[in-house]
């Protein structure tokens, strides 16, 4: 995580910061006057707890976001709205218009998770997952950033050998609103032999490829300066265009070393030698699969955050895990993926780097003090539940504040 917050800073050239209320945009990055105390900055954040463990982990993350923000002179206005199964039960649809409107009006959106057995048999338009896809499309969040870093404290949780897993620090940048998940035509039909068929379309425009590639180059530039573009250009036309456009853009980012890899090889290399990767950029479906694979290198689904950003509107910040119905309501969930998503919200959504670091440092300290939820427990560590883990992170946030005050 240290590597994560040390190397990834807010983008400079993309307008990824939403308009914030009550404070000029430049202040977050140049707030260094020793004479005047910083003016409070105020942001609206839409909170979407969702289903299963979503409400439990979001409640913890919201408190930590609030306190870490207050230590940096930031005020939050939170508005909680239903999404997913909770919205189906209360309003009859997985993404109510009011929820999307609130999300669009806010500075950033923090989501827990959606889904559960109860709604598994619903028709597609009434599934919680449909609400999530509609939310991403409605916000136009086309770039999904998923860090997968093996923390030294949790290296033994990886299924890989220690020497392979140690030091892994990858950022997968996945295209989120195009490709085969949205391409048309799609549907069911019958072929000329009378066999039923199902079909989808993998399609990308040059501008869609350019905008995701630019985000990836910017991310790589702030990390170790290495970008690997993953495609299937030996077979798919959409991938051939992808490779051509990414290669063309590389001339604008001469400080970034670009390489290309076919997706089948990338899936293999991620297991064989994951340390060769710094930043990976890929399309929607390959990114879905590879980012899950990369995250499993860390061995801890409960630890992994994500950010989904657009060109100018609010970003969507959420843990990568689902609603974990098997442990919901039992205070067993690991809230740290959502807490770290709140840190990404501060960094990528609001440009509040210092507050983001406060949260990430507090998470590291809490792990250093030996606290673990069930999913990351190891011998000699202290097993805690979701709430207690949150309290311990809050203690660490407060101890940083006390330390700063005494200097
Ligand atoms: N973005 C999302 O909201 C999202 C993502 C994936 C799945 N889902 C939905 O979630 C539901 C369950 O899906 P699934 O079981 O395949 O995936 P899942 O991520 O919910 O759970 C997989 C396993 O990991 C564990 N787990 C997940 N998060 C954890 C945490 N924070 N702490 C401790 N353990 C954790 C669960 O207990 C479970 O054993 C489904 O309805 C699915 O559609 C939602």
Image: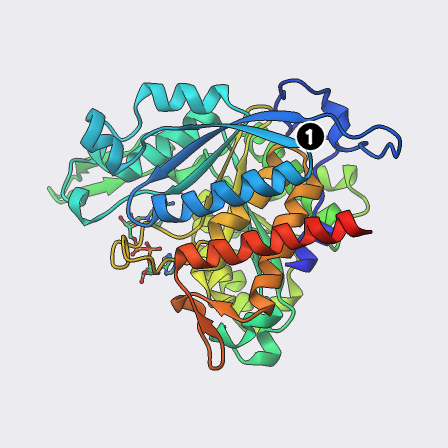
Q: Residue furthest front?
A: 406
Identify the image quadrant of residue 251: top right
Position of 172 relative to 177 (above/below): below
State the SS at label 1. Answer: loop
How far from the left and from the top, in percent, is residue 197? Answer: 19, 42
Q: Residue furthest right?
A: 35
Q: Look at mark 1 in the image and give the residue it sits on.
A: 14
Identify the image quadrant of residue 194: top left
How far from the left and from the top, in percent, is residue 109? Answer: 48, 32
Q: On the picture, is 161 further left or further right than 69?
A: left
Residue ID at (45%, 48%): 319
Mark 1 crowd level (few <14, some 14–19, many ≥20, 10 Å Cα): some
Identify the image quadrant of residue 114: top left
Task: Note whether ligand 1 is within 8 Å of mark 1.
Answer: no
Position of 392 relative to 138 (above/below): below
> Foreground: 25 or 58?
58
Residue ID at (60%, 34%): 349
Q: On the picture, is 115 further left or further right than 11?
A: left
Q: Residue furthest left?
A: 194
> Foreground: 135 or 70?
70
How far from the left and from the top, in percent, is residue 90? Answer: 21, 28
Looking at the rendering, the quadrant in which ligand 1 lies is bottom left
> Foreground: 27 or 240?
27
Residue 291 seen by the camera: no
How far from the left and from the top, in percent, is residue 249? Answer: 71, 37
Q: Quadrant of the N terminus?
A: bottom right
Q: On the picture, is 277 further left or further right than 262?
A: right
Residue 249 seen by the camera: yes
């Amino acid at each position: 995580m240290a590597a994560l917050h040390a190397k990834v800073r807010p983008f400079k050239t993309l307008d990824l910061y939403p308009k914030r209320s009550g404070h000029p945009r430049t202040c977050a990055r140049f707030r260094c006057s020793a004479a005047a105390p910083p003016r409070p900055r105020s942001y609206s954040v839409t909170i979407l707890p969702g289903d299963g463990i979503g409400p439990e982990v979001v409640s913890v993350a919201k408190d930590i976001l609030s306190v870490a923000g207050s230590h940096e002179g930031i005020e939050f206005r939170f508005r909680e709205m239903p999404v997913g199964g909770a919205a189906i039960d209360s309003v009859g649809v997985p993404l109510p218009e009011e929820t999307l409107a609130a999300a669009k009006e806010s500075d950033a959106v923090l989501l827990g998770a959606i889904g559960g057995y109860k709604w598994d048999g619903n028709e597609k338009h009434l599934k919680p997952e449909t609400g999530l896809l509609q939310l991403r499309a409605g916000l136009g969040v086309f770039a999904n950033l998923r860090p997968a870093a093996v923390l030294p404290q949790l290296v033994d949780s990886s299924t890989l050998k220690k020497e392979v897993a140690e030091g892994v620090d990858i950022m997968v940048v996945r295209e989120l609103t195009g490709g085969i998940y949205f391409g048309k035509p799609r549907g069911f039909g019958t072929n000329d032999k009378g066999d039923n068929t199902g079909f989808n379309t993998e399609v990308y425009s040059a501008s869609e490829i350019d905008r995701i590639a630019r985000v990836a180059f910017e991310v790589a530039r702030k990390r170790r300066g290495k970008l690997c573009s993953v495609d299937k250009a030996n077979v798919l036309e959409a991938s051939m265009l992808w490779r051509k456009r990414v290669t063309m853009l590389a001339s604008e980012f001469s400080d970034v070393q670009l390489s290309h890899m076919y997706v089948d090889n990338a899936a293999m290399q991620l297991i064989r030698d994951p340390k060769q990767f710094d930043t990976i950029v890929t399309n929607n479906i390959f990114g879905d699969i590879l980012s899950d694979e990369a995250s499993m290198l860390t061995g801890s689904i409960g630890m992994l955050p994500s950010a989904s950003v657009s060109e100018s509107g609010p970003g969507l910040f959420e843990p990568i895990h689902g609603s974990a119905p098997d442990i919901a309501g039992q205070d067993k969930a690991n809230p740290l993926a959502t807490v770290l998503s709140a840190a990404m919200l501060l960094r990528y959504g609001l440009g509040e780097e210092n507050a983001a670091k406060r949260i990430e440092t507090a998470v590291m300290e809490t792990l250093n003090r030996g606290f673990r939820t069930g999913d990351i427990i190891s011998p000699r560590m202290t097993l805690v539940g979701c709430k207690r883990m949150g309290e311990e992170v809050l203690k660490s946030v407060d101890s940083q504040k006390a330390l700063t005050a005494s200097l």
